[in-house]
Amino acid sequence: MEPIQDIDATIDYKAVTGLFQHAREQGRDSLFEYEVYDLLRFSGAETPPGTQFLARGAKPSDQALASMPGDRVVLKIVSRTIVHKTEAGGVRIVDNQPDKIRSAMRRMLYEVPENAASVIERDPAHAPAEYQGLSGDALVAAIAEDVHGVLLVRYMPPDSEAFGNELIVGIRRTREFGMIISAGLGGTDTELYASRFRKGQAVVAASTAMTDGCAFFELFKSTISYRKLAGLTRGQRRIVTDEQLIECFASFIEMANHYSPENPAAPFVIDELEINPFAFTDYLMVPLDGLCRFSLPAQCGAGRPVARIGNLLHPETIAVIGVSGSRMNFGRIILNNILAQGFPQKNVTVIKPGTDEIDSVHCVPDIASLGNRVDLLVVAVKSTQVPDLVDEVIRRDAAASVMLIPGGMGETEESRERARAVIRRIGEAHAEPDGGPVFLGGNCMGVISRPGGYDTWFVPKEKMPPLNPGKHHRAAFVSQSGAFMLTRLSQCPRLNPAYMVSVGNQTDLTLGDMMAWFADSDEVDVIAIYAEGFNDMDGLAFCRAVRRAVLADKQVIVYKAGRTPEGKSATSGHTASLAGDYMVCESCVRQAGAVVARSFTEFENLFLLAERLHHKAVRGNRLAAVSGAGFEAVGMADAIRSDDYRMELAVPSPATCTALAELIRSKGLDSLVTIKNPLDITPGADDEAHAEAVRIMANDPDVDAVVVGLDPMSPVMRTLINPENATRSLDDERSIAARMTRLVPELDVPVVAVVDAGHQYDPLVNHLKDEKVCVFRTSDQAVAAIAQYMDARLHADRIRALARNREKP
């Protein structure tokens, strides 16, 4: 079947803008439901049902009330504050007779405010701002005052009322990622579905700036909603075409991108547009309820001169302020670490009055005495001194980049005004023609730049993790938390990245800025990010930089802290609670091409795999597993699937089976071993048998990766350091350690080893890790890590292939 081409939505933007303008002239920042249907009509989407607005206080004629075809009609309350109408009794189906309609309308105008008031009194925290503090008759009266009337809607019976046959589609503006589209199981229980089903089954979300109708449709196809709508479940028939869904998604995406905070020409910004649900009648998508909130666009600030990140990471001159001449304070530790890393002493200056030199480094009394502009100024003074110091650095053009080490820059209520003052002054500098300096921090631990030859971390050398000696890896580690980065490197010093950057509070330079720099850097192939939060719209900038890095054949690993569900507000639709902050971040980052870690250990594992396997070929997701322990072979098979990835057990070729059978026979194990995958070679298999089994499996064109249990406690394996019996020494050239060290670099596909044993075997693990062999301590952890890593590599390959296809004439 040929892939479906994206569909160009035809949107009457002038008419849609007119709806927003009319509502704003009436003092509203939202559309009434019938106006949302007009918006859909102007967007080129499916034609909504016929409607007629019956204003409160009006006396519609029998002819007006009989304007809808059919035996029944739907009545809906019209109020800007009653969003969830069903809960308040604001939706009623009645016989299509003028008297019945008139009677139901009158009841609704009285009963709905009372019902809505009861809902608010049960949960006052989620009351609209206008009703906060009200109760009883006063609350009912306020709600009634906001009821504008009743909407008469043509009743269109759905093809099926079975579970899963309603669809929610929405777009909303997010602070970090801009416009987001989400779609999934609709109806009144849509939030329940999202919370009960596995990730990605009930609802999916994506950045509208980084997707189109077809791409989002491919994402949507993974949901239960699509399987139900497309008739792919037992007893179901298709009720909507793929082309209809793509047209709907494309229309929503185009509207989102037009009425976006990113569009400088946007007359309004859509804060939220939601249809919940679309029902389906005779292959028509029928919106049964809709809401839309909008706002005026805000002014954008000046951009940052991000080219000066080069001065920050590769400075030729460094100045440090805040160095004590009498004790080992943070500034003094930073100075010592800069020199210890090998940065030229003659290119370092300390700013300290009354002192000629500290640790043989020349001192000047103040910033004015620096002379020429330095590439990097490291600030390690008290936070109360920072605003005046920032102002002086900017006025004197004293530095191209500034590192703000101090805390007390927005972490507490008392320090927030100080941080705001610094941000305002930096923003003013960026608006000048030369853009002013860039600032890293505050509350940052500093930078270790191996290519730049310096270290500004304020951690004494004796407390630093011993970074692996020798050439660093072509990797960058960027963390919003310096402590997180320090701890991960302490736990796993073999990571050994070229750059370690603590961004702190993102007073100026952001995670998106650093990601963009390393995406374009010739020094790195792997970028690892720890993020706690993004500045306004920086999440989208970050994802765009991730995509650029992936297109440049780089690998990106992200851990995003903060998984608590977003608070649900009764004044918003379902879209925000379905696609909460963490889900949006995870979806957008994955969509961009990064692999998202779910735990600290997983982050370390993925980072290590990316550093060591970047050059290996990943052709598919077929795994071969080898072990002498039966439980381990079974455990490997059990770990190949999860919500986030899916691997297959490779089917060995006949040639591979023959070669394995010959190997097993040569070891006298043919009566004990069945040739299959996973391959249980029994505890009687020696070092050579393990290594050769890996070689044979890895050279099979139908195998994409190999996981091997090294069975360190087997009596015939050489896995001990200084054993009583020399035949068990891992220092032997015939040991599995020596064999894997020689074998792994020769193989094209990824190979991961498992040493599932106690501390007695740490020397074996350390030896293999030092020789750049990927080693895990349990088989399930090994399979999960390599599966997730390979899944991300394959996803990145698809992104690159799609980009190449789009570039073709």
Image: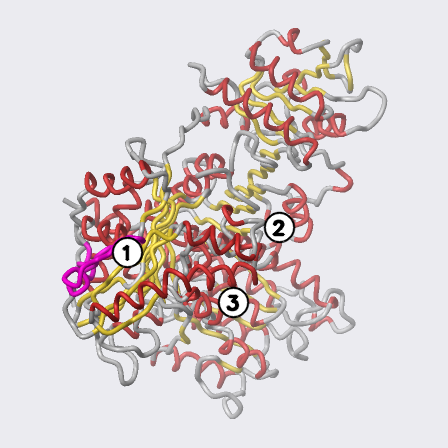
Report the amino acid beneath label 2. Arg
Location of residue 309 with respect to 127 vertically, above or below:
above
Most extreme residue toward the bottom is: 671
The residue to which callout 3 is attached is 784
Q: Which mark is residue 507?
A: none
Residue drawn where x is 43% and y is 61% of the image: 790
Q: Classify mark 1: residues with Cα within 10 Å, few (<14), some (14-19) or many (20+).
A: some
Task: Work out whether residue 552 can be spotted.
Answer: no
Residue drawn where x is 60% and y is 37% of the image: 502
Q: Position of residue 87 (x, y in %)?
A: 43, 66
Circles 2, 1 touching at the beta carbon (< 8 Å): no
Report the amino acid beneath label 3. Ala
Q: Which mark is residue 494?
A: 2
Q: CA distance from mark 2 to mark 1?
A: 38 Å
The residue to which callout 1 is attached is 215
Nearest to viewer (mark 1 / mark 3): 1
Report the span colored magenta: 45-67
Q: Position of residue 782 (x, y in %)?
A: 55, 67
Q: Position of residue 751 (x, y in %)?
A: 49, 64
Residue drawn where x is 26% and y is 50% of the image: 35
Circle 3 SS class = helix
Residue drawn where x is 55% and y is 39% of the image: 498
Circle 2 SS class = helix
Circles 1, 3 touching at the beta carbon (< 8 Å): no
Using the image as rendered, state which of residue 682 and residue 311 is in the foreground: 311
Using the image as rendered, state which of residue 757 and residue 711 is in the foreground: 757
Chain-order first, disc 2 or disc 3: 2
Residue 145 appears left or right of 165: right
Report the amino acid beneath label 1. Ala
Chain-order first, disc 1 or disc 3: 1
Q: Is residue 61 magenta?
A: yes
Q: Classify mark 3: residues with Cα within 10 Å, few (<14), some (14-19) or many (20+).
A: many
